[in-house]
Image: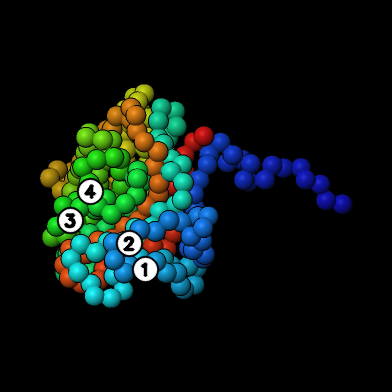
């Protein structure tokens, strides 16, 4: 005779809510939203599921862009509501050092989240995450709430042949001011200006809008760019 005498693991974690995908399916009706400036595509393939996000399937041009996010802006870090984000991603630049890539949490997903002319993250709304801009070959970390933002260029190279695990925690260390700690492949990001210091941002969460989990790629030259993502996950305390 069998008895259910222990709590299922899913209930042990019921104080969290999450969006986790291995990209085994790509349900545009219920799970995902895509945004393309021209002929971009989002496809899945391979063992375990790999998302390939392409800026343009034909006639590639500078500033072509592609975005994929979850459907609902469900995440809103705030006091006593810490958050965690993680993705396993890889890209090989179609034009050397000209790809623009973003991976993280953002409000109002639309073209221009990655600015034209390799201008980095837009100067409005909210964004917390990793990005790489055209003209560079290392990861940056950016945290923004409206006009208040932090940005740090790291020592960690981007655009490698191997996938990189990108994760960060948003911790409410001082009430409405969050401490944000990013890591790459389990190691703390290092500041390119002060290499002995790990990257750590402080961000005021007052009036922070709700956020989507998002991955994005934009061409900094007239070549198609592709971002590959093995999995994407965002978790927050209820």
Q: How far apart are marks 1 and 3 (CA)?
A: 19 Å
- Disc nearer the start of the sequence (4/1): 1
User: Mark 1: which secondary structure?
Assistant: strand
Residue 85: where, in percent of width, then height? 40, 47
> Contact (CB < 8 A) between labels 3 and 4?
no
- Disc nearer the start of the sequence (3/2): 2
Q: Report the front residue among 82 and 44.
A: 44
Q: Mark 2 points at which residue?
A: 36
> Contact (CB < 8 A) between labels 3 and 2?
no
Residue with the most extreme front position: 38
Q: How far apart are marks 3 and 4 (CA)?
A: 10 Å
Q: Distance between the residues labelled 3 and 2?
A: 14 Å
Q: Distance between the residues labelled 4 and 1?
A: 21 Å
Q: Name the residue under label 4.
A: 121
User: Mark 4: which secondary structure?
Assistant: loop
Whether residue 160 appears in this view of the structure is no
Q: Report the front residue among 43 and 199.
A: 43
Report the side of 124 relative to 51 (left or right). Answer: left
Query: Badge 4: few (under 14), some or many (20 or more) residues near its Cα, within 10 Å?
Result: many
Q: Which of marks 4 and 1 is in front?
A: 1
- Disc nearer the start of the sequence (3/4): 3
> Contact (CB < 8 A) between labels 1 and 3?
no
> Contact (CB < 8 A) between labels 1 and 2?
yes
Whether residue 150 appears in this view of the structure is yes
Q: Name the residue under label 3.
A: 116
Query: What residue appears at the point 40 percent right and 35 percent down from the top-left corner?
Result: 77
Q: Distance between the residues labelled 1 and 2?
A: 8 Å
């Amino acid at each position: 005779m069998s008895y259910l005498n222990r709590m299922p693991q899913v209930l042990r974690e019921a104080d969290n809510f999450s969006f986790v995908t291995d990209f085994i399916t790509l349900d545009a009706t219920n799970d995902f939203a895509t945004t393309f400036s021209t002929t971009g595509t989002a496809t899945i393939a391979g063992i375990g599921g790999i998302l390939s996000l392409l800026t343009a399937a034909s006639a590639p041009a500078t500033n072509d862009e592609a975005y994929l996010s979850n459907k609902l802006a469900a995440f809103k870090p705030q006091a006593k509501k810490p958050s965690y984000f993680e993705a396993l991603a890889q890209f090989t630049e179609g034009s050397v050092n000209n790809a623009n890539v973003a991976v993280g949490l953002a409000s109002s997903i639309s073209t221009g989240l990655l600015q034209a002319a390799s201008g980095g993250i837009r100067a409005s709304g909210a964004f917390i995450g990793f990005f790489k801009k055209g003209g560079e070959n290392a990861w940056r970390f950016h945290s923004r709430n409206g006009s208040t933002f932090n940005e740090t260029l790291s020592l960690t190279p981007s655009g490698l042949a191997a996938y990189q695990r990108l994760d960060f925690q948003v911790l409410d260390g001082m009430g409405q001011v969050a401490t944000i700690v990013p890591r790459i492949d389990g190691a703390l990001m290092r500041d390119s200006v002060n290499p002995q210091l790990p990257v750590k941002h402080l961000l005021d969460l007052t009036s922070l809008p709700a956020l989507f989990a998002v991955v994005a790629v934009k061409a900094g030259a007239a070549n198609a760019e592709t971002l590959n993502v093995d999995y994407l996950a965002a978790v927050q305390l209820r």
